[in-house]
């Protein structure tokens, strides 16, 4: 089967799995996305994490991802990926390896998940929005990248995330440096994007 045909099938499959709804900061949604952990205990346990990711999960350094309002299950899965070596970062690998207690991981993830969702300055990038829609990104990541309702936490919140971080992740998916997407779609999507498209869609998402 030609590569592009398989790419289209993958996109259609994820569109079938997801809707264009998106998550919110309602009490019900927050409760769902924080999972089984204790966010109160997690605040104290996440002190070291806050040094890079911000006290409330809104990092000030554009290469450090925001975690505010991210799904707890997604955060936990990324930590597991760093521990197993399927995702690599010198700082995060070391931090992840030190997090051996599952309850601590649940609590820390719940704390960041319980925060109001990351947000940008709400400026417009029409070209970036067009790319976001043309590649059907909204079907997995929600209408403006704010994620699907919490029962679909396989797809992360990316609306309001730092532009520099998004650019790096898309390039890592494109080169194969990152290959941890459970849906199997991100590598194909990124491979069909030009550098200019990656820049534009990342800028668009960072403003949400």
Image (cartoon, helix red, strand yellow):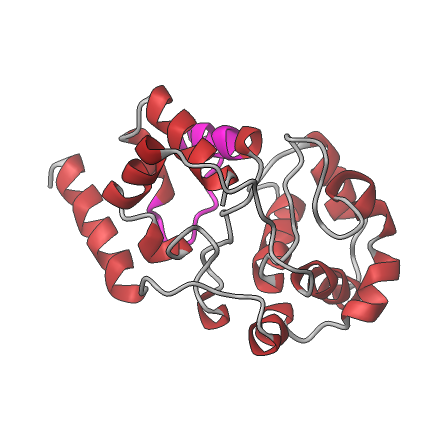
* Front-most of residues 118 and 182: 118
- Residue at 12% across, 36% down: 2
- Residue at 21% across, 42% down: 7
Q: Quadrant of residue 142?
A: bottom left
**Magenta segment:** 166-185
For this view, does 162 lie left or right of residue 9? right
Reply above or below: 132 against 12.
above
* Front-most of residues 19 and 24: 24
Can you give x and y, in whole percent of width and height, for residue 144 in the image? 41, 51
Using the rendered image of the protein, determine whether residue 188 is visible from the camera's viewpoint: no
Reply above or below: 54 against 44.
above
- Residue at 52% across, 66% down: 24
Reply above or below: 114 against 93.
below
Q: Quadrant of residue 26?
A: bottom right
- Residue at 67% across, 47% down: 83
Reply above or below: 196 against 149.
above
For this view, does 98 lie left or right of residue 57? right
Total numbered labels: 0
Q: Is residue 171 magenta?
A: yes
For this view, does 130 lie left or right of residue 69? left
Can you give x and y, in whole percent of width and height, for residue 124 in the image? 42, 36
The quarter in which the N terminus is drawn is top left
Q: Is residue 181 magenta?
A: yes
Can you give x and y, in whole percent of width and height, for residue 64 in the image? 67, 35
Using the rendered image of the protein, determine whether residue 153 is visible from the camera's viewpoint: yes
Most extreme residue toward the top is 195
Can you give x and y, in whole percent of width and height, for residue 9 in the image? 18, 51
């Amino acid at each position: 089967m030609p590569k592009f045909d398989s790419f289209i099938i993958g996109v259609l499959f994820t569109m079938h799995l997801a809707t264009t709804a998106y998550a919110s900061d309602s009490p019900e949604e927050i409760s769902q996305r924080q999972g089984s952990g204790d966010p109160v205990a997690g605040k104290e346990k996440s002190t070291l994490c806050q040094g890079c990711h911000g006290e409330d999960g809104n990092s000030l350094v554009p290469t450090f991802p925001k975690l505010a309002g991210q799904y707890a299950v997604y955060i936990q899965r990324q930590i597991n990926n760093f521990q197993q070596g399927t995702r690599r970062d010198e700082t995060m690998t070391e931090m992840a390896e030190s997090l051996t207690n599952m309850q601590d991981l649940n609590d820390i993830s719940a704390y960041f998940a319980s925060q109001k969702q990351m947000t940008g300055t709400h400026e417009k990038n029409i070209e970036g929005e067009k790319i976001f829609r043309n590649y059907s990104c909204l079907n997995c990541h929600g209408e403006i990248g704010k994620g699907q309702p919490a029962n679909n936490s396989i797809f992360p919140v990316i609306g309001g995330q730092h532009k520099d971080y998004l650019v790096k992740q898309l390039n890592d998916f494109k080169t194969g440096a990152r290959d941890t997407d459970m849906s199997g779609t991100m590598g194909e999507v990124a491979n069909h994007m030009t550098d200019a498209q990656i820049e534009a869609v990342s800028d668009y998402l960072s403003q949400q």
